[in-house]
Image (spheres, rainbow, N blue to C red):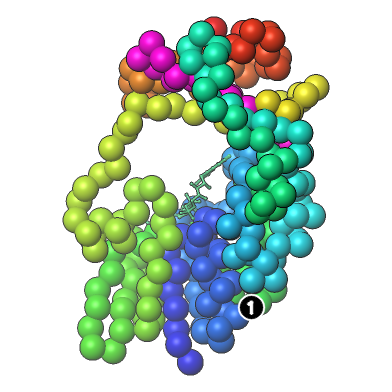
Amino acid sequence: MLRAIIVGGGIGGLTAAFALRREDADVVVLERAGELREIGAGISIWVNAMEVLAGLGLAEAVRAAGREESEGIEATIRTAGGVTLSRLPAEALGKRFGLNVILTRPDLQRVLLDAVKEAGVPVRAGSECVGFRQDRSGVVARLSDGREERGDLLVGADGLNSVIRRQMLGDERPRYAGFTAWRALVDLEQDDQAFEAWGGGASSGWSASAWAVSTGTPPRTHPRGRRTRGPGGRRRCSNGSGDGTNPSLR
Ligand SMILES: Cc1cc2nc3c(=O)[nH]c(=O)nc-3n(C[C@H](O)[C@H](O)[C@H](O)COP(=O)(O)OP(=O)(O)OC[C@H]3O[C@@H](n4cnc5c(N)ncnc54)[C@H](O)[C@@H]3O)c2cc1C
C-alpha cells in the first residue's frame, strides 16, 4: 500500500489527505500547530473547487456548513471616483457555471477534518516538519523534535512559508505586494455588493460573504506587517453611499 505523508493540516493538506485515502493510500497528516484551532473568517469556494469537492463526495457537507452566494450579488470594479468599469453579476455566473459557496474557514476546516478522521487518517498535531530527504526507497520527513516519518510520497501543504517548497525550489521568500486585507466577521443588513476601486496609486475595496466581510484601505504603500486600526469596531460597515464609493473606506 502506498504510504503518503502530508505536511500541513490546512485546507489543501486535509483535502489531499482525504483524496489519497480514497485511493487506498495509507496517509498521515503532520501539522505544526499544537491543535487545529478555529481561526479565520469568511472564505469563498468557487465553482471549480466545488467540483473537486463534489468528486470527493464532500460538496454537500460543505454546502450544508455554509450557503450558496446569493444570485443578487454583483461585484464591480470602479475608478477611485466611483465610476463603474466592469460588472460581475453572480446571477450570470451562476447560470453558466453554478454559484460559489461561502462559509467560514473554521467550518470548512471542520468539515474536512471530520471527513479525514472518519476515513481513519491520523492527524498528528504538534508535528513541525523542518525538511525532508529522499533515498531509493522513498522519502523521510524530518520533524523539529527529531522524529522522522517515512513514506513513498510527501505532499508539501504547509502554506505560504512552506519549508517543503523552500527545500525543493530554493530559498525564495514570498514577496509582499503591498496589499493588506482585513478579515472579520460582522453583522450586515445587506450583502449584495462587492467592489474594488482603482486609481490614485492605490486600490481599495470590500466584499461581503454571507456572514463575513473583508475590507482593505489604501494598501499600495502599506508597510508589511504594520499594525493598523482595521475597520472592525471603529468604522461602521454600511453598504455604500449610493455614489459608488463606500464611506467605510474613506
Ligand atoms: C490560521 C489561518 C486562518 C486563515 N483565515 C482565512 C480566512 O479567514 N479567509 C480566507 O480566505 N483565507 C484564510 N486563510 C488562508 C487560506 O486558508 C489559505 O490561503 C488557503 O486555504 C490555502 O490553503 P493551504 O492548505 O495551502 O494553506 P493553509 O490553509 O495556510 O495551511 C497550511 C497549514 O500548514 C501548517 N504548517 C505550516 N508550516 C508547517 C510545518 N513546517 N510543518 C507542519 N505543518 C505546517 C499550518 O499550521 C497550517 O495548518 C487562513 C489561513 C490560516 C493558516
**Front-lying residue, 249 or 36:** 249
Q: Is residue 234 above or below residue 26?
A: above
Residue 87 image offset from top left, x and y in percent: 59, 30
**Relative horizontal placement of residue 169, taking residue 66 as reference (left or right):** left
**Relative horizontal placement of residue 174, taking residue 46 as reference (left or right):** left
**Quick one: quadrant of the C terminus?**
top right
Per the rendered image, the range of residues in magenta is 194-213
Can the viewer see residue 212 in this picture?
no
Can the viewer see residue 161 in this picture?
yes
Residue 203 image offset from top left, x and y in percent: 44, 20
**Relative horizontal placement of residue 190, taking residue 105 as reference (left or right):** right
Residue 206, magenta (yes or no): yes
Three-letter code for the amino acid on which mark 1 is drawn: Gly
**Front-lying residue, 167 or 82:** 82
Q: Residue at x 62, y 50 (%)?
A: 45
Q: Is residue 5 above or below residue 41?
A: below
**Relative horizontal placement of residue 81, taking residue 155 as reference (left or right):** right
Residue, disc 1: 120
